Image (tube, rainbow, N blue to C red):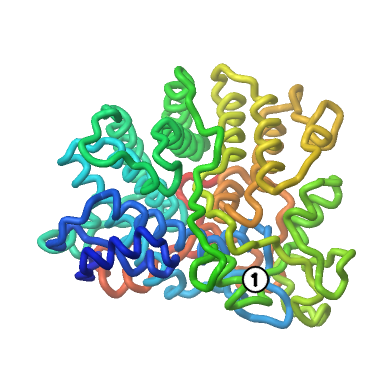
Amino acid sequence: MKTNMRNLKIFLLVFLLISFTSCNDFLDINTSPNEPADVPVELVFPAAVGSTAYVLGGWYQILGGMWAQHWTQSTGASQYRDIDSYDLQTDAFDDRQYGELYTGALNDYKYIRETAKQNENWSFYLMATVMQAYTYQVLADIYDEIPFSESLQGEGGLLTPKFDGGQVVYDSLIARIDEALAKDLSAVTVEDPGTKDVVFGGDMTKWVQFANTLKLKIYIRQVEVRESVAFAGIQSLFANPNFLTVDAKFSSFKDEPENRNPVYETGVDRLGGSISISRTLFSFLQENGDPRLNEIMDYPVSSPTLHNTLVQGDYLNTLPTNIQGLSTPTLEPLDAVYFISAAESYFLQAEAVVRAGVAGDAQSLYNSGIEASFEKFGATGASDVYEDGKVYAFPTAGTLDQKIEAIVTQKWVSMANSQGLEAFFEQNRTGYPDFFTVAVNNVTSGQFPKRLFFPQSERTGNPGNLPAIKPLTEPVWWAK
C-alpha cells in the first residue's frame, strides 16, 4: 500500500486548513508520518475528516443511494448506468476513492494517533481513533476483506500488506476504540480541539457517545453470524448506556464551486441530470401518506405538482425523455455529510433492546428515531404516523422479525439522500426493506449486488496477497 508522499510546506497546509477552501483541497493536503514536517495534529485532523467526508459522502454515497433504492439513473443520461445495472468493473472506486481513503484519511488518522499518544493528547487520540475505525468499517463492509493489520506502514514497512477478513477488522476496531476510551480525556498537553474539531466543535462528551454508538453498530452488524459476541458487546454497552442524541456529521461547506457537499458538487452541479428518485422509495412514502415525501424529493421541472419516478434501473425507458420529467432528490450545496445520524443512533438502540433483551424502551427509542428523521428532513407531524394505530406504529405485540422490519425500514427512510451506503449495508444484513426490486437492466441474472470488487490498484500492486475474486453478488461475512 503506497503512502502519500506529498512534501507540502507547513504554511500552505495551515492556510488551507484554516480557510477550509474546498473539499478538493482536503484531498491535496494529507500529511504522512514519514514526512519530515512536524505538523500539529490539530491542523491535520480537519484534513483527515474532510477526506473521509469527501469520499464517503461523494461517489460512495451515489453507489449507496442507488443500491439502497433511494435513487436510480434517470432517462436520457448515462453517468451512473454501470452502478444502477450492477455492471461495475475492477477500476470502479479505485485511486480517487479507495486509494484516497488509505493514502489520505486513514494515513492521517494514523499520524494523529501516533503523535497524540506521544504527547498524551488524549482528546485528539480518541477523535482520530473513532474516525479511523469508522472509515475502516465502511471499507470492510463493502469489500469484505481489506488491508488492515499490515496497512499504512509506508517506507521501511510493507508496501504489499496482507488482507484481513471483516471479522478480524471488527474485533480489532473494538479493541482500538476501547483503548482510546480508557485514556484520561482531561490530560491535554496542547490546544483543546475547539474549532479544529469539525465534527463536534471540541465537545468530548459527544465523541465518547460517537465511540459508543459506533461500537453498538459494529456489534449489531454481527448478530446473524456471531450472536454471542454481539450480545455480550451490546450488554456491556447498555450497562451504562451513553449514545449519540445528535448527528455526527461534517458540514464545513460553502456555497461556491468546489466547496460544496460532494454529492451536490458531482451529482447536481457537474453531472446534473442523472440522479432521480427510485420508485421503490417513492411508492413506500406515498402509500403511507408520509409527510417526509416532499422534503425528500423535488417535483419534476415539467410537472411541478405531480411526482414521477422510475422503477429501479429502468433508465432505457423512452418516457420521460430526460430528468426534466422526473422527481429528483432534494440535494443542497450546504448539506452535511453524515457519519452516524441521531436517527440511526436511536434505531440501533431500539434494535439492541428487542434483540438482546437489554434494559430500554424499544418503542420509545423507535419513535425518537422517527422524530429525529423528521427533524433532519425539516418535516412535521411525526407523532401522526407513529402513535398507536397509525401507519408506522411500533408493533409492540409483534414478533421479533416484525419489530426488526419496522426499525430497519424506518432507518432506511431516514438515510435517504445522505446515508445511502449505510442503508444498503442494513438491507444486506437484514433483508429489510423486503420490497426492493432488482434493477430492470441488471447484468447479474436477477441477483442483487452485495459487495464491490477489489480495486485494480490492489490487483496490480499487491497480487501476492489479493484474496480470491468473488462476484458482486456474493454476500459479505455478516450478511443474511
Judge the density around disc 1: few (<14), some (14-19), many (≥20) Cα neighbours within 10 Å: many
Residue 392: image x %, image y %?
Answer: 79, 36
Q: Nearer the viewer, residue 263 or 366?
A: 263
Figure quadrant of residue 81? bottom right
Q: Which residue corresponds to mark 1?
A: 442
Amino acid on which the number 1 mark rests in the picture: Asn
| Residue 265 visible in rendering | yes
Give left or right: position of 200 versus 389. left
| Residue 225 visible in rendering | no
Q: Nearer the viewer, residue 362 or 377?
A: 377
Q: Residue at x 86, y 28 (%)?
A: 389
Q: Residue at x 81, y 55 (%)?
A: 283
Q: Nearer the viewer, residue 332 or 273?
A: 332
Residue 436: image x %, image y %?
Answer: 71, 55
Instruction: Indicate whether 328 appears above or below 150.
Output: below
Which image quadrant: the C terminus? top right
Residue 459: image x %, image y %?
Answer: 32, 71
What is the total number of numbered labels drawn onto the structure image? 1
Residue 15: image x %, image y %?
Answer: 32, 64
Q: Residue at x 46, y 72 (%)?
A: 92
